[in-house]
Amino acid sequence: MRWVNRKMRRNDRMIAGAVPILALLVLYLVMAAQRHALNPSDKILPLPDAMARGLSALLFQADPLSGHFLFWTDTFASLQRLGLGLGIATLGALVAGLVLGVLPPVRATLGPLVTAIAVIPPIALLPVLFIALGLGETAKVALIVVGIAPPMIRDITDHIASLPREQIIKAQTLGASSWQIMIRVALPQAMPRLIQAVRLALGPAWVFLISAEAIAADTGLGYRIFLVRRYLAMDVIIPYVAWIALLAITLDFALSLASRRLFPWAHGASH
C-alpha cells in the first residue's frame, strides 16, 4: 500500500507524534550532559534539576516585594491579555467578515483598506500604539488585535464570498433580506472557518503578546523571560518557553475539539 493511502489509528498517530518530541528531549539531555561534563557551571544548557530549582522559586515562593507567586501571576497576566486580544479580534473578524462577505458594495469599498492594514507588520506599529495609547494594558491588547484581526477578516470575507451563489438565490427566492442571508446562510457556515482562523492566529498572537510584554510590562510570561535573560538564567527561560508552548497547544486542542463537537458537518462524516 502506498503511504498516501495509509490510514493511521488514533493510538498510532499519538505514538508517531511523540517520537520526534522524545528525540529532541533526548538530544537536549545528551548535549547538556556533554557541556556540563566540560564545564559544571555552564548556564546555556541547564540540566533538568537546575531548571526545577530555578522554577520552584517562582512557583512556590512568594515574591518578597509583591507577595505574589510570580509564575502564576505572570501566567494569569499573559492569558488575560491574550484572551482579551483574541476575543476582540474574533468578534471584529466575524462581524466585519459577514458584512464584507455578504455585501459586495461594502467589500469593494472597504476590502482594499483591510488588505492594506493586513500587510503592515504589526510590530512596526508597536511604538505608535504605545505613544497613542500609553504603556498600560490597552496598548498590549491593541497590538494583538491589530496583528491578527485583519488577516482573520480577509479569511472570513473570502470564505463567505465564495459560498455557492445558489444558496443566496434560494434564500432570496424565499423572501430573505440581506440581514437574514447574513444570519441564516452565511453565519452558520462561517463559524467553523472562524474557529480555524483563530487557531491559525494563536501563534502570531503569542508573538505580539510576548513582544509587547518585553517592552513595557511589569508582569507576564514575556516580561519575565526578557527580565532574566540579562542574567543568562536559562534555567528559568527554558521552562517558561515550554510552558508557553504547552498553553498554546492546549488552546489549539480546545478550539479543535470545540469545532468538531459544535460543527461535525464541517469535518466530514468520517470524524
Image: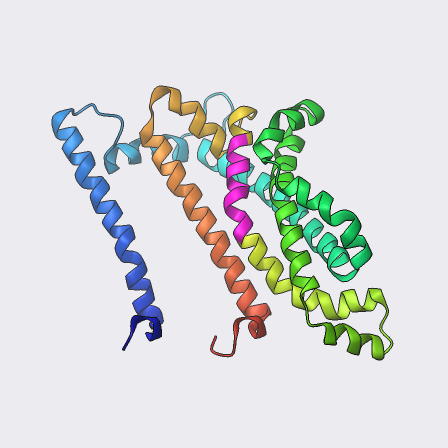
Q: Where on the picture, by quarter, is residue 131?
A: top right
| Camera-side residue of 74 and 258 | 258
| Camera-side residue of 10 and 113 | 113
Residue 173, above or below 263: below
Q: Residue at x 66, y 58 (%)?
A: 158
Q: Residue at x 44, y 42 (%)?
A: 244
* Image location of residue 260, percent across then percent down: 53, 68
- Residue 45 visible? The answer is yes
Q: Residue at x 20, y 40 (%)?
A: 29
Residue 201 forms part of the magenta stretch = yes
| Colour mapping | rainbow
* Image location of residue 178, percent across then percent down: 84, 65
Q: Report the residue that reaches farthest toward the left.
A: 37
Query: Magenta stretch mostly in which secondary structure?
Result: helix
* Image location of residue 7, percent across then percent down: 35, 74
Magenta residues span 200-211
